[in-house]
Image: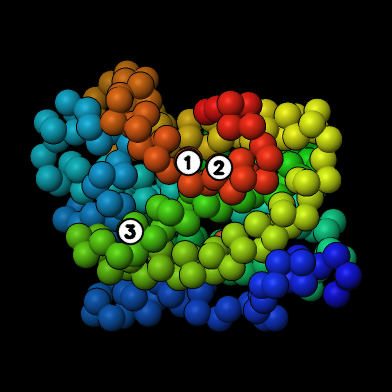
Amino acid sequence: MSSASPARSSGQAFHAQPNTLCGAHTVEAAERAEGGQPVGAQDSAWYVVPEQLSIYGTELYDELSPPDKHRLSRFEAALWASNTVHGEDQVLGGLAPRGDLHYFVGVFAAEEVNHQQMFRSYLQHLGVELLPTRAVGWMTPPLTEAEFFACTYVFEDIVGRSNRAIAKDERCHPVARAVNHAHAVEEAVHLNFGRANLARIIPELTEAERNRLADQVGSYLRAVWRERYRSDVYELAGLPKPWAIARQAWSAPRQVAHRVDYTTRALRHLTVLGLDPEEIAS
Ligand SMILES: [Fe+2]
Ligand SMILES: [Fe+2]
């Protein structure tokens, strides 16, 4: 462990081995507990919290039948799962050259690989193929250490917030709750690691570097949120005029408020460390 290790500088401890609670067996165990098989195309349950749906707060949401809402929740759960897999790919790419930074980098990477297996199994449960990302690769060109940890931090914080909401909501299907709970537990430790690294890195930046970092984080956040309003997902869920829905949902006041709500917490730590919230505005 280096003298600049985040664990020492923050006083926080990180587990030394990957947490074995998480992985493909999380889905299998939850399915067995339900006494059944993958539900696939059964549209009689919530897979995300209804208030998290990307069309919540629009007239269209009010007009949909319960099975249509459940079906959309299944495809939006698949979108969250797919985008988590893609985001974790990017995180793994960023961790790869940083193995010497701290012993936890290896554990972190092993856990992300485990999460990807879990989310791929969850996609099978949902009866949906891995959905492609529409975001341009945010690791190209290679990010600075500050950019990598800041973007990873906001990504993990937003995903973790969604995970926790689903995990504790009794309206959601037990498999959805189990998967989201397993991910939230390990992401909490990743966030601690990210906070410790950012507390070491950001104070050493010049004002110009901090402004560039804030701008980068803002661009990244817009890309993350844009991925949530996907015409291809609306089309898969059988909604009419999916392109119009994507445009209208993005601008709906309830959706703008939701994005601000979920992003504020992710940014709080960065602004405490000295990033200008105006520069990050998303
Ligand atoms: Fe993860
Ligand atoms: Fe993570």
Q: Is residue 79 left or right of residue 1?
A: left
| Labelled pair 2, 1 in contact (Cβ < 8 Å) | yes
- Secondary structure state at the residue bearing disc 1: helix
Q: How is the image coloured?
A: rainbow
- The quarter in which the N terminus is drawn is bottom right
Label ID, residue 166: 3
Q: In this view of the protein, can residue 117 be seen by the observer?
A: no
Which residue is nearer to you in this view: 227 or 124?
227
Amino acid type, label 2: Leu
> Residue 165 location, x and y as percent?
34, 57
Q: In this view of the protein, can residue 220 be seen by the observer?
A: yes
Task: Identify which residue is drawn at 78% across, 55% down.
Answer: 200
> Of circles 1 and 3, which is in front?
1
The vertical placement of 81 against 223, above or below, is below
> Residue 100 location, x and y as percent?
87, 66
Task: Identify which residue is drawn at 43% across, 54% down.
Answer: 161
Residue at disc 2, CB closer than 8 Å to ligand 2:
no
Q: CA distance from mark 2 to mark 3?
A: 22 Å
Residue at disc 1, CB closer than 8 Å to ligand 2:
no
Amino acid type, label 1: Thr
Q: Check disc 1: other Cα within 10 Å, few if <14, some if 14-19, many if 20+.
A: some
Q: Check disc 2: other Cα within 10 Å, few if <14, some if 14-19, many if 20+.
A: many
Q: Check disc 3: other Cα within 10 Å, few if <14, some if 14-19, many if 20+.
A: many
Label ID, residue 172: none
Amino acid type, label 3: Ile
Label ID, residue 267: 2
Q: Is residue 30 left or right of residue 51?
A: right
Q: Which residue is mark 1?
A: 264
Total marks shown come to 3
Task: Give the quadrant of residue 232.
Answer: top left
Q: CA distance from mark 2 to mark 1?
A: 5 Å
